[in-house]
C-alpha cells in the first residue's frame, strides 16, 4: 500500500512531534481500555475501535482552525479525543452513564459536542456525508470561512448519498473536506471485493472535485494534505477529497471473528507501519526526546485513561426520568 | 502488580464461551495488542488480545475448557520478576454482575382518566377582517412572512426557485428573497434532505420542499434517523429546527407510486411534529408555527386542496398552535374526526346526515403529533359515538390509533364501536372508475355514522 506521492519531509518541531505522539497515544490507550471495559460487560452494544487509524484524525485536527466543524460515522472515539472532548465524558457515554456527553442516551455511536463543533457520531453508514455538507452549507450561508471535515469509510464510499452530496457540494462550492478513511475493510468485505474502481478519491473527478491519496499511517503526511485541502476550501473553491489509506488493527466491532484477513497481515502492518511507532522513531533518532521522556508521556496518558475509566464506572446511571427528556426542544439551541 | 485477565464478553449477548486455545504460555512476555487466546462463542471463534503488558504468570483456565463465564479470571499477568499472588492462582467464577440491572419502569398503562377539557378558543377574534385566500397563496404568504422575519429561514427543493414551484407554492419567493434563500436542488431527495438537516444542525432553519411526499421515501432515513433522533441522542445539545413540506396523498389519476398518504407513518415517530392542514387558514397559521418550531416538522399538504379558497384573517402575525384541534361543526349525535383532505368527506357527510336529522360534530385535528385527544374525548363523552375519516390505508391508520385512545380513555362512554373510514387496502389504481372506488367517499362516512347511531 505505498502512497502515490512520496510524503514530503516537512520541517517539524519537537513540540509538534511530541504533540502528535501524545494525541495518538491517548487514542490508542483509550481504545484499549474501552475494549477491556467492553470485555468486562461495562460497555454494551456495538463498540467500534479506532486502533491503527490514529494518524488520520490527529493529522487532520492539526490542519483545523477554531470554528471548523467535524462529523463522522460510528467509529468516532478517536475523532472526539482529537478535537479535545474530555475523555471522561466519552468513556462515561460508552458505559451509558449520566456523566457521558449525551447523558448516557447516545452510546458509543452517538455522541456530540456543540462546544467542540463535533456533530456526531452517526450510526447509518454514509448518512454523515450530506449532513457534513449541510454543516458547510450553513457556514457558507452565514458568510464565515469555516470548513467542515466530513469523515467516512471505504464502505460508506459506495453509498449513493455520497455521490448526491458530491454533486451538490461542488455545484454550490461548499467548504467541506471529504475524508475517506480507507481502512481497506468494510466490516468483513475488502475494497477489492466491493468495487472495480478502488481509487476512491478519483471518483470525485466525475463531479469536478479535486483530491488526493494520502499515507494515513504517517501523521505528518496527513497534516500536510489536510492543510492543502483546507486552503482549497477556505479560498472558496468548494470541496476537496482526501482518501487516507489507513488500517484498523481490531475487528469491525467487538464481535468480529476477523476471518477475512490473516493474522500475519495485521501483524505486518503493526510491525512496519504503525503510526505511533513511526513518530516515536522520529523523536528518538532526531534526539527530540529520550526514552525516559517518552516513558513519562506514556505514564501520563495511562493516568488520563485510567481516570476516564474510573469516572465512567463511578458516574451514576441516568435517572429514569431522563427517558422522557430531550425528545422535543422548547427553544432553538444557540450556536456555541 | 499482578493483573487479572478476565474472560471477555465478545458480543453484547455473550454470557459464556469456550477457551479454545491459548496462544501464549506461562513465562511469555506480552504487550498490548498481542493475541493471547482464541475464544469460541456460539457464533464464532475470536481472537482475544492483551490490553496490559507483562509476563504471563499463570494460566488459570486451561485451553479446551467449555462454559467459561464472562468475567471469570482466566490468567494472571505479572511484572518481570514478580510472583503470582496465592489467592489469584485458583479459578473462581465471579458472581457479581458488573452493572446493576435496573429495569426501567413503564408509565402506568391506564391512569384514571380525568375529564378531558377541549380548548375551544377561536383561531381569530370575531371582529377581525377576513379575506378569501387559496391554500396555495396561504402557504406562500406564510413562508414569505417568516422569511422576512428571520434571515436564517430558507427554502430548498426541486423547482422551487426559477420554475416558481412545481405546484406554484413558492411563486414570487425567488424574486423577493434571491437565489441564496430560495434554492433549486438537483433531483436528489436523499442528498438534499441530508444537507438540509446538516444546515439545521449548523444553526439555520431550512424549509425542505418535496415535490411530493412520495419522493420523501428516498429521504426518510434523514427525516427519522438524522432529524428526529439527534436531539435525544445528543442529550439535548443539538437538533434540527426545520420543516419538511410538500403535497401528500392521492392527487388524481397519477397511479400507485404518486398517491400515498404518509400521515400515519410520520405520526409514529417521537421527535417529529406532524401537521396536516385542511383550510387556507390552517395552512397559513400552522406553517408559520412550523417554521418557528425548534423541532423537525412534517407538513403534509394536499394537491387537490391547493386551489380551494377559504377565509383567512387579515392579521400581521396569524399563527395556530400545534396540538389544537378545531371543531368545524358542532353536533350531539356522532363525532366525526378527520384532518387534511379527509375533512372534505367529513363535512360533506355531516351535511347529508343533517338532512336525516343526525347532528354530527366534526373535528378537524390539524396536527397529528402532538394530537389534541382532549377535544376528541370531550366530544365522544357527549355523542357517545365516533367515526374517523382519512384517505390512508386501514392497517396502522391514524383512525386506528384514535379508536385505541377512545377505547382506553372513554370506553364507558361508547354506545357503539368506533368505525374507521379509510382508503381501500389496495395500491392506487390508474383507471378512473377504479381510482374513484379506491378512495373514500362521503357516502361511506354517512353509512358509518348511521351504523354507529343505529339508524
Image (cartoon, coloured by chain):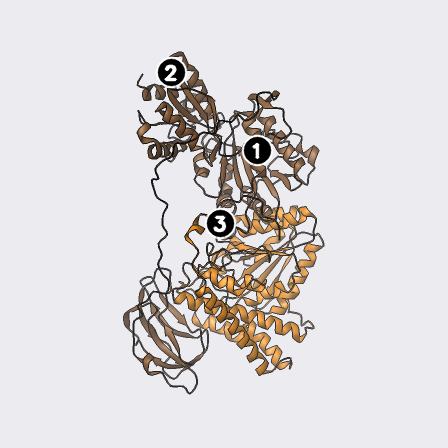
Q: Position of residue B28 (x, y in %)?
A: 40, 82
Q: Identify the chain of the residue marked 3, using the numbered disc in the image.
A: B
In the image, which lettered chain appears orange?
A: A
Instruction: Give how far apart the Cα atoms at labels 1 and 2 are.
Output: 35 Å
How crowded pointer 1 is (Cα within 10 Å; few <14, some 14-19, many 20+) is rated as: many
Disc 1 with disc 2 on a shared chain: yes
Counting residues from the start of the chain, the first of labels 1 and 3 encountered is 3
Q: Nearer the viewer, residue B223 or A7?
A: B223
Residue holding disc 1 = B287
Taking A23 as reference, is B298 above or below it? above
Q: Is there any visible trace of residue A226 in the rendered image?
A: yes
> Residue A161: where, in percent of width, then height?
54, 48
Distance CA(mark 3)–CA(mark 2): 47 Å
Q: Which residue is mark 3?
A: B232
**Residue denoted by label 2:** B358
For disc 2, the chain is B
Amino acid at each position: 500500500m505505498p502512497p502515490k506521492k512520496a510524503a514530503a519531509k516537512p520541517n517539524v518541531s519537537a513540540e509538534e512531534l511530541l504533540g502528535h505522539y501524545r494525541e495518538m497515544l491517548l487514542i490508542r490507550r483509550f481504545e484499549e481500555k474501552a475494549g477491556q471495559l467492553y470485555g468486562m460487560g461495562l460497555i454494551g452494544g456495538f463498540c467500534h475501535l479506532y486502533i491503527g487509524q490514529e494518524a488520520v484524525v490527529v493529522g487532520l485536527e492539526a490542519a483545523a482552525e477554531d470554528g471548523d466543524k467535524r462529523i463522522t460515522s460510528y467509529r468516532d472515539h478517536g475523532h472526539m479525543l482529537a478535537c479535545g472532548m474530555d475523555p471522561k465524558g466519552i468513556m462515561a457515554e460508552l458505559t451509558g452513564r449520566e456523566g457521558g456527553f449525551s447523558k448516557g442516551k447516545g452510546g458509543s455511536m452517538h455522541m456530540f459536542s456543540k462546544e467542540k463543533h463535533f456533530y456526531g457520531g452517526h450510526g447509518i453508514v454514509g448518512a454523515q456525508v450530506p449532513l457534513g455538507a449541510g454543516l458547510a452549507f450553513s457556514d457558507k450561508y452565514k458568510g464565515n470561512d469555516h470548513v467542515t471535515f466530513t469523515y467516512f469509510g471505504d464502505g460508506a464510499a459506495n453509498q449513493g448519498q455520497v455521490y448526491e452530496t458530491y454533486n451538490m457540494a461542488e455545484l454550490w462550492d461548499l467548504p467541506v473536506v471529504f475524508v475517506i478513511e480507507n481502512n481497506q475493510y468494510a466490516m468483513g468485505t475488502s475494497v477489492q471485493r466491493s468495487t472495480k474502481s478502488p481509487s476512491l478519491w478519483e471518483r470525485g473527478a466525475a463531479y469536478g472535485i479535486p483530491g488526493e491519496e494520502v499515507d494515513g499511517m504517517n501523521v505528518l503526511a496527513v497534516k500536510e494534505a489536510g492543510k492543502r485541502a483546507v486552503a482549497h476550501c477556505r479560498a472558496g473553491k468548494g470541496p476537496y477529497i482526501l482518501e487516507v489509506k489507513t488500517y484498523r488493527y481490531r475487528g469491525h466491532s467487538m464481535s468480529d471473528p476477523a476471518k477475512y484477513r490473516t493474522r500475519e497481515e495485521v501483524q505486518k502492518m503493526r510491525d512496519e507501519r504503525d503510526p505511533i511507532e513511526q513518530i516515536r522513531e522520529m523523536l528518538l533518532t532526531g534526539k527530540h526526546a529520550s526514552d525516559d521522556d517518552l516513558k513519562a508521556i506514556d505514564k501520563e496518558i495511562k493516568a488520563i485513561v485510567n481516570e476516564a475509566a474510573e469516572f465512567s464506572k463511578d458516574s451514576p446511571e441516568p435517572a429514569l426520568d431522563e427517558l422522557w427528556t430531550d425528545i422535543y426542544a422548547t427553544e432553538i439551541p444557540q450556536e456555541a | 502488580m499482578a493483573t487479572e485477565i478476565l474472560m471477555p464478553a465478545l458480543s453484547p449477548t455473550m454470557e459464556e464461551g469456550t477457551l479454545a486455545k491459548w496462544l501464549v504460555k506461562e513465562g511469555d512476555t506480552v504487550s498490548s495488542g498481542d493475541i493471547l487466546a482464541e475464544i469460541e462463542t456460539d457464533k464464532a471463534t475470536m481472537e482475544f488480545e492483551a490490553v496490559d503488558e507483562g509476563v504471563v504468570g499463570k494460566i488459570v483456565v486451561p485451553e479446551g475448557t467449555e462454559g467459561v463465564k464472562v468475567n471469570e479470571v482466566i490468567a494472571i499477568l505479572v511484572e518481570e520478576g514478580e510472583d503470582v499472588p496465592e489467592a489469584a492462582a485458583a479459578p473462581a467464577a465471579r458472581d457479581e454482575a458488573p452493572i446493576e440491572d435496573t429495569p426501567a419502569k413503564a408509565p402506568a398503562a391506564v391512569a384514571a382518566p380525568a375529564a378531558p377539557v377541549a380548548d375551544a378558543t377561536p383561531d381569530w377574534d370575531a371582529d377581525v377582517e377576513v379575506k378569501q385566500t387559496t391554500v396555495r397563496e396561504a402557504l406562500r404568504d406564510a413562508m414569505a412572512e417568516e422569511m422576512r422575519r428571520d434571515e436564517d429561514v430558507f427554502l430548498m427543493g426541486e423547482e422551487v426557485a426559477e420554475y416558481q414551484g412545481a405546484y406554484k407554492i413558492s411563486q414570487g419567493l425567488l424574486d423577493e428573497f434571491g437565489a441564496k434563500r430560495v434554492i433549486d436542488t438537483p433531483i436528489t431527495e436523499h442528498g438534499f434532505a441530508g444537507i438540509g438537516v446538516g444546515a439545521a444542525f449548523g444553526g439555520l432553519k431550512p424549509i425542505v420542499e418535496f415535490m411530493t411526499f412520495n419522493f420523501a421515501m428516498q429521504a426518510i432515513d434523514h427525516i427519522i434517523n438524522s432529524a428526529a433522533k439527534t436531539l435525544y441522542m445528543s442529550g439535548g445539545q443539538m437538533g434540527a429546527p426545520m420543516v419538511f413540506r410538500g403535497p401528500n396523498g392521492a392527487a388524481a389519476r397519477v397511479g400507485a407510486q404518486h398517491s400515498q398518504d404518509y400521515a400515519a407513518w410520520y405520526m409514529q415517530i417521537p421527535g417529529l411534529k406532524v401537521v396536516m392542514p385542511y383550510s387556507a387558514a390552517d395552512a397559513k397559521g400552522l406553517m408559520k408555527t412550523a417554521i418557528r418550531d425548534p423541532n423537525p416538522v412534517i407538513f403534509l399538504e394536499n394537491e387537490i386542496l391547493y386551489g380551494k379558497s377559504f377565509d383567512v384573517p387579515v392579521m400581521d402575525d396569524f399563527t395556530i398552535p400545534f396540538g389544537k384541534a378545531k371543531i368545524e361543526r358542532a353536533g350531539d349525535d356522532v363525532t366525526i374526526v378527520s384532518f387534511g383532505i379527509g375533512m372534505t368527506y367529513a363535512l360533506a357527510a355531516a351535511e347529508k346526515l343533517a338532512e336525516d336529522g343526525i347532528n354530527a360534530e366534526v373535528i378537524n385535528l390539524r396536527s397529528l403529533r402532538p394530537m389534541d385527544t382532549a377535544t376528541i374525548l370531550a366530544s365522544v363523552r357527549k355523542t357517545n359515538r365516533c367515526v374517523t375519516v382519512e384517505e390512508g390505508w386501514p392497517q396502522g391508520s391514524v383512525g386506528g390509533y384514535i379508536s385505541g385512545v377512545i377505547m382506553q380513555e372513554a370506553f364507558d362512554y361508547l354506545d357503539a364501536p368506533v368505525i374507521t373510514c379509510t382508503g381501500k387496502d389496495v395500491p392506487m389504481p390508474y383507471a378512473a372508475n377504479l381510482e374513484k372506488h379506491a378512495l373514500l367517499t362521503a357516502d361511506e362516512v354517512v353509512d358509518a355514522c348511521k351504523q354507529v347511531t343505529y339508524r
